[in-house]
Image (cartoon, rainbow, N blue to C red):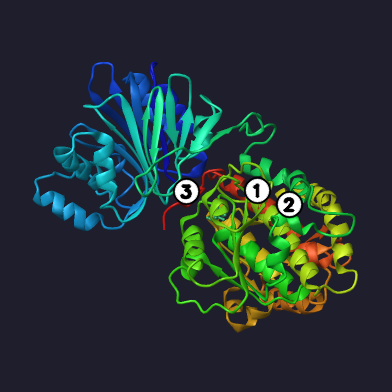
Amino acid sequence: MCGIVGAVAERNITAILVEGLKRLEYRGYDSAGVAVYTNDKTLERMRRVGKVSELEAALAAQPLVGRLGIAHTRWATHGAPNERNAHPHFSGDIAVVHNGIIENHEVLRERLKAKGYVFTSDTDTEVIAHLLTEKLKAQPDLTIALKATVKELHGAYGLAVINAQQPDRLVAARSGSPLVIGLGLGENFLASDQLALRQVTDRFMYLEEGDIAEIRRDNVQIWDVSGQAVERQIVQYSDGAEAADKGEFRHYMLKEIHEQPTVVQRTLEGRLSQNQVLVQAFGPQAAELFAKVRNVQIVACGTSYHAGMVARYWLEELAGIPCQVEVASEFRYRKVVVQPDTLFVSISQSGETADTLAALRNAKELGFLGSLAICNVGISSLVRESDLTLLTQAGREIGVASTKAFTTQLVGLLLLTLSLGQVRGTLGEGVEATLVEELRRLPTRLGEALAMDSTVEKIAELFAEKNHTLFLGRGAQFPVAMEGALKLKEISYIHAEAYPAGELKHGPLALVDNDMPVVTVAPNNELLEKLKSNLQEVRARGGELIVFADEKAGMTNGEGTHVVQMPHIHDILSPILYTIPLQLLSYYVAVLKGTDVDQPRNLAKSVTVE
Ligand code: F6R
């Protein structure tokens, strides 16, 4: 999703801005631009549709040299992805970049047009630039004018602004879209994600909701939502663990798939005793809160939502706790009836997904017992705003399609299930000890599944000419099938749908013919025989079957049936294991199709707009 970079320094900052944009490329975008207050004392910009490399080439041909600038990667919301709509947007001496959505942009646009402002784009952002120019007429100080401007904006924004009349500073505002200030020596920076600035500094200050910041070369001032001057904590990063490189792998996605044994191991570290889950892993107040929990409401989006759906099976089966799961974009706008003593659980890789954050904020008004975030980013808004947190240790995920974030979320959710069951005394005899043991073995099992990489690569060839696919699963494998279908859609652009296998005969069977491959995950559980019957229904209609089956399930290759034998695993952990071959399948199909695997079209990594 959109990215922001800004800099005020004593040296030329254009290359820093462009490098920052490159580091944000993984988030997905469709155009890029930079505005620089040049050494000739003019405000100039360069914008290009497509990749940051195109902007870079344009800047090489026609350099912009200056010590103050802002830059942006845009993921289109209002207006087509063209150069006219790319940021920065200008109004007189003002340049603005913006992440988020201004909901009252139409009203503001009409008002500003009536005052004679001429709009050159279809974006909601341009109204901010003109509104600021209008405010500067009454109050010439840029920072004060920005404070007045944001009072009139409804919606979400992370904003960075420069003004050719006040080139000593960069100003910024945060409401609903993250911003971080990078602190240098005699130079300071701004970005929507600290990753963009790791090239220039390791010291960061995160803006909070409602903050306005004035960033000068040698000084940073911040005001909170009530207008009080505030200090924000400085966070220093000292390790190089976030280095972004693909190593021996062709794509980040493949690298991240193969990292899963390691990151699952890390997510378990320090959270298990000999035969129990350590409840305090969820925070010091977790045991007290968990003891009161009688229901769980899970809210998330996309892949994280699928993790929540798996957790529902676990929570009800193992801990006997009723659980509801809903996508955040629906939950946030629905009249929700909250059962007494319900724990609100949000799941998010980024912790900045706008719908999930809004759902959490609504939940706080609805009388939930408390909130827990299962999240991969410790400094995210979701973590800051939740009562309890379990951080997944997936490390940075660069591929837009989520892989290792999902499996580590599942691990976190199983730890939650066991913790709730332990505190409430609802787990069956020996269940916790058995599953703790199985969790310890999980990284090894995942490694075994990854060793099937080349087998899955071969299977992928079956999909090269196909346009549609069905994914089937039963029980907790149904969400795994949904996740498999989502991965295939996202990166190979093949239409894929997931069904609980028992639903096939209630409609989707009509689609099945020899052009419709059907992918199934078949662990060795009590639903296996029923699943086998469902698969016969597919074969009888000429559908080609690809079955990832437990080595003990007794399934073998046959005409039109390709069986990949999976290592045996405890049924409860099988959703984690069976995710692996589906990720590999999508990956290899996408490679065959020649798509942009790490940055699939139209998608963004962290969806910070509604
Ligand atoms: C799919 C994918 C998305 C995200 C969704 C939620 O591969 O990555 O569906 O899962 O946008 O994002 P987070 O987990 O950051 O809240």
Label 3 vs 1, first from the N-terminus: 1
| Location of mark 2 (residue) | 456
Q: Is residue 426 above or below residue 373?
A: below
- For discs 2 and 3, the disc positioned in front in the rendered view: 3
Q: Are marks 2 and 1 in contact (CB under 8 Å)?
A: yes
Q: Disc 1 beta carbon < 8 A from ligand 1?
A: no
Q: CA distance from mark 3 to mark 1?
A: 17 Å
Left or right placement of residue 160 versus residue 241 in this view: left
Q: Tag 1's secondary structure?
A: helix
Label 2 vs 3, first from the N-terminus: 2
User: How many marks are shown on the rendered structure?
Assistant: 3
Which quadrant would residue 526 be assigned to in this image?
A: bottom right
Picture coordinates of residue 199, whole percent (x, y): 53, 25
Mark drawn on residue 601: 3
Closest to the observer: 424 or 550?
Answer: 424
Residue at the spot x=70%, y=32% of the render?
Answer: 248
Residue at the spot x=62%, y=63% of the render?
Answer: 306
| Location of mark 1 (residue) | 588
Picture coordinates of residue 344, whole percent (x, y): 59, 67
Q: Which quadrant is home to the C terminus?
A: bottom left
